[in-house]
Amino acid sequence: MNKGVEKDGEISYALLDLYQPPTSHRDEFTTALNSVIKKVDSLIPVFGLRNPRISAPGTYKYTFCTADEWVASFWPGQLWLGYSVTGEERFKNSARMRREYFKRVLESPAWHDHDLGFLFSLTFVADYKLTGNQTCREMALRAADFLAARWRQPLPFVMCWNPQPRDVDTFAHRKTGTLNIDSMQGMALLYWATKETGQTSYADIADMHLDTCIKYLIREDYSSYHSFEFDPRTGKPLKGYTHQGYSDESCWSRGQSWAIHALAQCYLASNKGNYRTTAAKMADYVGQRVPDDGVLVWDYDLPADQHPYKDTSAAAITASGLYTLAHCYAGHPEAEKYTKIADKILHGLVSQHDITSVDGSEGLLKEGAAFVGLDRANNMLPYGDYYYMEALMRSVGHVDFFW
Ligand code: GLY
């Protein structure tokens, strides 16, 4: 565990840049990280047992998760990051107070979907990695078992969604054969399970899933589809489409960010060169589209007549993914290139969207776009907050996370 060091009367959580060219914004990002940690600390008594979901419209106040929400682990994830850098017990205790919520998820098969990775990497894997707690290790391995068991032949991937009784028949049918780009991040849980147990089957399934994602979700120009539909009975690939992006053929920025972060992280876990190369080409696509202010718009192909909502969550995930990619290229010129793009995006977030010093704000970043098609734009989002904290930590040299 890393502990802060005192510098000029202030605690600093920056580490030496051990593996990549140093960020050119070290002081700025160190100050921002310190402010983030103070804010997370101050929110522990405010949130109590609740996990933030999305901000109430027009406010910097969160609404909170009920049962079965994919975003429930991002606040515990921030608490575990806080514990990893400060060593202060209150971060750990608050994260652990949420165990019952996640135990209930494990015990409810109807709630199991491709988000098991998000839910359990940032809770039980985090606890086990930082404290050695054996119960958490077992719970995380059970989550990995449930995720791996979602592979249904003849489909060459882990099933993402579950048909629900409320779905109309056509959508229910489509759901079973749909592969989503968000699922890529979850594969880290399977690589972790192989590392823990020595059983290669978890990693084999993760490899199959990611190879299918690369083949069908990533286009020739290294932009991406949000989703790809297969015939669930025959496994025949049908077509790419979008769920949360602007259109079927556009490139949804958060989808692109999930793929870059996941592939870089999974390269570190598997050493498979194709993951690093694909992440790099997807990062090059983004590098040509970062706006002057550094902060990504919610879709890379938005027509001029559409409101260009920012998506600070996509920006934070991309920045964190690019620092991870720089780590993958340690010692190569690409490391400098991807650090530079990450710096531009993160500087944009720190200088224009960080709300940690706003009195009473319950989040770290404004202007996330959860789902523009459903009018959910301009919000604080717990995943934007989590990846912002992760990106700041990566920018100043931290390399141990829970993926
Ligand atoms: N459901 C994943 C996302 O909104 O990014």
Image (spheres, rainbow, N blue to C red):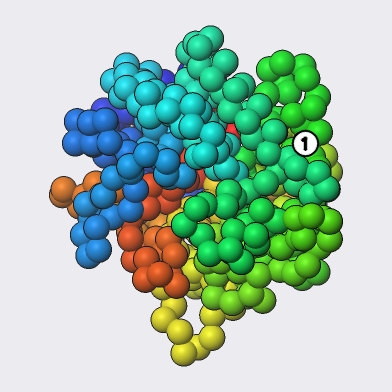
Query: Which is nearer the eye, 75 or 69?
Result: 69
Residue 74 placed where, x, y %?
42, 40
Q: Which residue is drawn at 64% across and 75% down?
A: 248
On the rendered structure, is 152 left or right of 180? right
Relative image position of residue 271 (x, y in whole percent): 80, 35
Residue under pointer 1: 205
Nearer to the camera, 398 or 382: 382
In-image side of 334 versus 394 (left or right): right
Residue 340 visible, this orientation: no
Q: Which residue is drawn at 26% across and 49% down?
A: 63
Mark 1 residue type: Ile
Of residues 109 and 360, which is closer to you in this image? 109
Q: Is residue 312 left or right of residue 378?
A: right
Q: Looking at this rendering, what residue extends furthest in the bottom direction?
A: 305
Answer yes or no: is residue 272 visible.
Answer: yes
Q: 10 Å neighbourhood of mark 1: few (<14), some, or many (≥20)?
A: many
The image position of residue 270, as x and y in percent, is 77, 33
- The answer to whether 95 is drawn above or below residue 265 in the figure is above
Task: Please identify the quadrant where the C terminus is shown.
Answer: top right
Q: Is mark 1 on a helix, strand or loop?
A: helix
Q: Which of 303 and 151 is in front in this view?
A: 151
* Residue extending furthest toward the left: 359
Q: How many marks can you see?
A: 1
Q: Residue at x 67, y 57 (%)?
A: 178
Residue at 63% from the left image edge and 48% from the top image edge: 160
Q: In this view, does 36 lie above or below 99?
A: below
Q: Position of residue 362 (x, y in %)?
A: 24, 46
